[in-house]
Amino acid sequence: MVDPSKTGVFQKLFIESKDRILKFIFFGNYFYGTCIIALSIEASLQQRKGLNDPIYYLLVFSLTTIYYTIPYIRKKVSNTANKRVQWYNQHQKMLMSSQLILSLSVICMSAIWLNKYWNGIGSLSLHSYFLLSIFPLAGIFYYGSRSKALKKFSLRSIGWLKPFVIGFVWAGLATVYPVIFYGIETNSAYIPTTVGAFLFLKNFMFVSMLGIIFDIKDFEDDQLRQLQTIVVMTGLKKTLFLIVIPFSILGLGTFIYYALTHSFHLGKILFNTIPFLLLILTSFSLKKNRSILYYFIIIDGLMMIKAICGIIAITYF
């Protein structure tokens, strides 16, 4: 027979190992890097474009991970109850090594990609250059408060605007960037389409709603810092029931209307509605206090679910 005491030890070790792995993936921002790849593939397929060079996906993975980690490097906060900040405090050396490796990878991969597709860059239109610039600029100004030069231009300090800036940047990188870079890789012009605009709006709304929900976990800290996020200004229940759920239903209804007027296959409609339905159901679950990992795994996990459902829908229906 198995010694009960040993069973308890193994169970404890398993739980601790699982907790460490989850924190590494989610707190380390590697999951965000994976999400941007999945959403990019979804958007490319939905716009009837081929997939990008694998180097492109490695680049966006690395850059996304670097971007989300930068604010926490060498910024130790003492006496904090925030488990994410505690994790960053304990793993500064690992994070520095990760940032260095990812940065070197970006330099190497960028050199390889430019060497392969340099000719395609010269044929880009001014419109394409504008689109390639506006989303990174929005991302830079989001963290403007971290830089003395950009302190006055911090979009992050405008609490109610935060989730919409995040939604705008993610929608651009996931919807517009893959198509423009595919055009560079295949020497074909980027032509904006109605489908592309609809997908951009869909991603913008979806990620913005996730951003609003994510501010719930920082409600008390934001209130103390007098950061006027939507949750702080309107309260938890009003945020969920007057903003997140209604806008999610609006997004769902808009998609269904678009799908029906364009004769989408029933299977495609059903798979694409799953993320919106889960977003609505998840909103109801937030009436209770949830752990920070719940937000990372469940809330951010909806981005991955959306991408997977979209890929299945466009591939098989």
Image (spheres, rainbow, N blue to C red):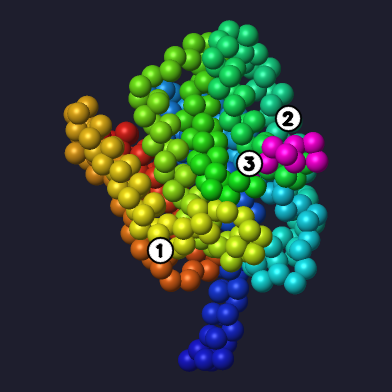
Q: Earlier in the sequence, mark 3 or mark 1?
A: 3
Q: Earlier in the sequence, mark 2 or mark 1?
A: 2
Q: x, y (%) of residue 103?
A: 74, 38
Amino acid identity at mark 1: Lys
Q: Earlier in the sequence, mark 3 or mark 2?
A: 2
Question: Which label belongs to residue 288?
Answer: none
Left or right position of 87 against 93: left
Tell me where the magenta segment starts and ends, as one range: 148-156
Residue on which the image places disc 2:
108
Amino acid identity at mark 2: Cys
Q: x, y (%) of residue 165?
A: 55, 40
Amino acid identity at mark 3: Leu
184 and 194: which one is in front? 194
Q: Is residue 116 visible?
A: yes
Classified by dominant secondary structure, the portion drawn in magenta counts as loop
- Residue 143 painted magenta: no
Residue on which the image places disc 3:
155
Alpha carbon separation for disc pair 2 and 1: 48 Å
Residue on which the image places disc 1:
237
Q: Is residue 162 above or below residue 241?
A: above
